[in-house]
Image (cartoon, rainbow, N blue to C red):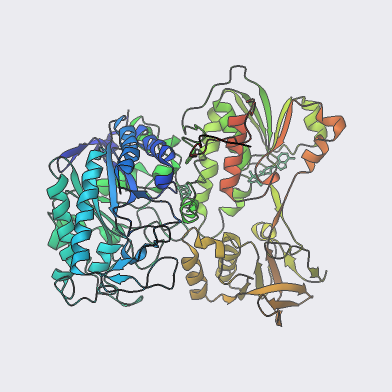
């Protein structure tokens, strides 16, 4: 039973004609599956409902072919087949006594329409698309506006037919209704442009139309991205009109779902590196005083105390969440059952954002089962029980070893986990001390806490095992999760061969830096890794008072973080803190005190002096044990011996966790198919091969 401190989280709340059973609301968010993966999508949303979320929303759902976000995955309600697919999702959500919500969407000039190939539309005919095609959207005529209103109504009726309880008018993320609200996009001279009353007109009409069409039995929600539509120019102070908009429409919808959108992707789901839990409060706390309708807000909430506090303090009525539902679909049930210490807390790494940005099904660092509900049948809390438990030795207590040991343990196997160090955590023990990454230690905390309670798991610390030790122990199943090490020879993403390095040069790897090596004088970081390491080390040494230059062959700093919606924040922070940034330069040679760089386009060379050079490049697997133990004379001693995580192939923490989990789930199961998961394929009637 839950603590009385959290009573408020379990109070039902009326939303127009429907009632949510509690205050846990999975707000609309893309999952990289969209209408092409109806089974995966349905299973994904149902899992949230099973985990106790009172409302589960489907992501942006196109109301018409003039709004197409390909190659990203989105939902659509264009015809009866879409109704059928989305009904499957609503049914799954209803099976667990939750309400199903759907976010009807028209992107205006922010759609790409690469798939449908019809022109985009916007209030005043500006250039179009997130992908910056060289095309201009069509300025909407009055007929277009009438059509748009009809499409919204038709889609709302289809959503109702599909069984949805809450139907959105979506005015967030600079999509079409926001483009009408915004002075930046709306330069119309008719009754839809000019004054705020005119710019609000379309949104007002869409809310009224939707209510008239479905409001008898469905709640009408508005998602509004605040601080997002009144900025004529980035950096202009003030001029926000969100309060006025909400005041003008205050009582029209049944629910306000508000978030901080701002002028940059990544504001609304800002990573932990650049925001704290509850970071949206100061942007949205005015909303409740302007309306009597329930207000949903987000803020990467993972602590039940923070959540209950938000409601008690009157900031919001309902706890909205996207990432916390991904990291732990069972968060509400765990709070209800008094198991808060078992919550798999979101670490705010935004790997989930990267999956969606790559148009792929979600992946999550904390929760390896996300996106795998249908295709692999993985459940985040239920594990197939071993009919004949095996004894397994797992070597290495980093993310891969921890996840593997935990999952094998949950499946009922007898697990021995041996870790060379004094603590569990592997690379994260040091990496979580880098600037902005402290929440990443939750990956370790969650697993270590549960592992230490399991009677069928034994943990040995200070146990650097050799091949002889492992042979002597006599386990028939051995899993090696011994990690990786940073290269010191310059080989990275773009440098495929070692570079010439003068032995007198002071050259460090990220591992040296995290082990507090003596860094002297002017620091140059060569970043050919392109994720967080180069940027974090630059920040670390700026904070320590060094002069820092970051050199990268890419066109921007920490280029891969564009996919986690962090790149803009990383580069801004480094520039503001005085880091000297040199882009598009390859490192070609290292002398004792100087470097040679070459432009990746022209080859033109330049020289740079340094005192300490840090190579944030590639890592190599630490797989010596595996090589020794799989010599022909040794391998026969084991029924199975495998490498997982970084010692198989160094990658991000998300890959190590998934690798550990995947190994455990497949352990002892004979693989009968070439592909270990199901795909949503159209099955052809005849195949002649
Ligand atoms: P991954 O991300 O794949 O989990 P890490 O580098 O984070 O990899 O973790 C690897 C862990 O394995 C580290 O904690 C390290 O101390 C441990 N380890 C490496 N070699 C051995 C060994 N021979 N015996 C026991 N533990 C080891
Ligand atoms: Fe949170 Fe990272 Fe998982 Fe996204 S990928 S839900 S940010 S832990």
- Using residue 564 as the reference point, say whether residue 527 is left or right of it: right
Q: Looking at the picture, how far across and down is residue 560, in whole percent?
A: 55, 61
Q: Quadrant of residue 203?
A: bottom left
Quadrant location of the C terminus in the rendered image: top right
Q: Looking at the picture, how far across and down is residue 400, in whole percent?
A: 62, 41
Residue at position x 53%, y 44% in the image: 443
- Using residue 402 as the reference point, say whether residue 169 is left or right of it: left
Residue at position x 47%, y 28% in the image: 382
Position of residue 226 relative to residue 628, above or below, is below
Query: How many labels, in total?
Result: 0
Q: Looking at the picture, how far across and down is residue 433, in whole percent?
A: 56, 55
Q: Quadrant of residue 556?
A: bottom right
Which residue is outermost to the top?
388
Q: Is residue 97 visible?
A: yes
Depth order, front residue of 517/361: 361
Residue at position x 52%, y 46% in the image: 365
Q: Quadrant of residue 342?
A: top left
Depth order, front residue of 124/286: 124
Position of residue 609 relative to residue 382, above or below, is below
Q: Is residue 309 visible?
A: no
Quadrant location of the N terminus in the rendered image: top left
Q: Looking at the picture, how far across and down is residue 490, in whole percent?
A: 74, 64
- Using residue 251 as the reference point, say whether residue 516 is left or right of it: right
Depth order, front residue of 138/494: 138
Depth order, front residue of 303/623: 623
């Amino acid at each position: 039973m839950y603590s009385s401190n959290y009573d408020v989280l379990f109070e039902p709340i009326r939303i127009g004609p429907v009632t949510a059973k509690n205050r846990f609301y999975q707000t609309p968010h893309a999952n990289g599956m969209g209408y092409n993966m109806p089974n995966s999508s349905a299973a994904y949303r149902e899992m949230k409902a099973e985990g106790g979320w009172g409302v589960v929303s489907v992501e942006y759902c196109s109301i018409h072919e003039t709004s197409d976000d390909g190659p990203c995955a989105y939902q659509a309600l264009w015809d009866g087949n879409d109704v059928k697919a989305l009904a499957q999702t609503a049914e799954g959500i209803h099976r667990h006594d939750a309400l199903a919500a759907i976010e009807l969407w028209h992107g205006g000039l922010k759609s790409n329409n690469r798939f449908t190939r019809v022109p985009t539309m916007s209030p005043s005919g500006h250039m179009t698309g997130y992908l910056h095609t060289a095309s201009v959207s069509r300025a909407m005529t009055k007929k277009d506006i009438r059509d748009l209103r009809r499409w919204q109504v038709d889609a709302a009726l289809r959503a109702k037919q599909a069984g949805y309880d809450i139907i959105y008018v979506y005015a967030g993320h600079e999509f079409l209704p926001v483009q009408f609200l915004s002075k930046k996009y709306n330069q119309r001279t008719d009754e839809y442009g000019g004054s705020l009353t005119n710019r609000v007109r379309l949104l007002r009409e869409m809310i009224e139309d939707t209510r008239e069409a479905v409001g008898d039995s469905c709640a009408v929600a508005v998602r509004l991205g605040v601080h997002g539509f009144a900025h004529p120019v980035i950096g202009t102070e003030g001029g926000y009109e969100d309060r006025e908009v909400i005041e003008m429409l205050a009582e029209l919808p049944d629910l306000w779902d508000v978030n901080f959108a701002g002028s940059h992707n990544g504001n609304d789901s800002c990573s932990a590196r650049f925001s704290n839990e509850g970071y949206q409060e100061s942007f949205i706390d005015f909303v409740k005083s302007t309306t009597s309708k329930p207000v949903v807000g987000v803020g990467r909430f993972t602590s039940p105390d923070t959540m209950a506090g938000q409601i008690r303090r009157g900031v919001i009525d309902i706890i909205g969440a996207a990432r916390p539902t991904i990291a732990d679909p069972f968060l509400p049930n765990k709070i209800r059952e008094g198991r808060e210490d078992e919550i798999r807390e979101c670490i705010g790494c935004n790997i989930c954002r990267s999956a969606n940005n790559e148009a792929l099904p979600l992946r999550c660092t904390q929760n390896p089962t996300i996106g795998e509900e249908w295709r692999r049948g993985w459940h985040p809390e239920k594990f197939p029980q071993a009919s004949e438990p095996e004894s397994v030795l797992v070597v290495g207590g980093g993310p891969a070893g921890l996840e593997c040991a935990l999952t094998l343990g949950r499946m009922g196997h007898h697990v021995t986990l041996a870790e060379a160090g004094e603590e569990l955590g592997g690379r994260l023990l040091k990496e979580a001390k880098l600037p902005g990454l402290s929440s990443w230690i939750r990956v370790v905390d969650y697993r270590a806490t549960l592992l230490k309670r399991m009677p069928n798991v034994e943990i040995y610390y200070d146990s650097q095992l050799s091949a002889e030790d492992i042979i002597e122990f006599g386990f028939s199943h051995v899993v090696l999760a011994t990690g990786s090490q940073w290269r010191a020879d310059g080989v990275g993403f773009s440098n495929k061969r070692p570079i010439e390095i003068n032995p007198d040069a002071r050259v460090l790897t990220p591992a040296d830096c995290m082990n507090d090596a003596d860094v002297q004088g002017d620091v140059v970081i060569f970043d050919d890794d392109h994720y967080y390491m180069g940027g974090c080390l630059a920040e670390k040494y700026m904070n320590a008072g060094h002069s820092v230059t970051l050199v990268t062959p890419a066109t921007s700093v920490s280029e891969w973080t564009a996919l986690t919606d962090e790149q803009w924040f990383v580069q801004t922070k480094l520039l503001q803190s005085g880091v000297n940034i040199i882009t598009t330069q390859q490192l070609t040679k290292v002398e004792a005190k100087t470097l040679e760089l070459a432009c990746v386009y022209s080859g033109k060379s330049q020289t740079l002096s340094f005192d300490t050079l840090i190579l944030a490049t590639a890592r190599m697997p630490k797989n010596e044990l595996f090589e020794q133990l799989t010599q022909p004379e040794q391998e026969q001693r084991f029924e199975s011996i495998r490498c997982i995580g970084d010692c198989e192939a160094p990658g991000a923490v998300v890959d190590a966790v998934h690798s550990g989990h995947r190994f455990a789930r497949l352990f002892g199961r004979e693989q009968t198919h070439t592909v270990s998961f199901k795909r949503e394929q159209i099955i052809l009637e005849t195949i002649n091969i």
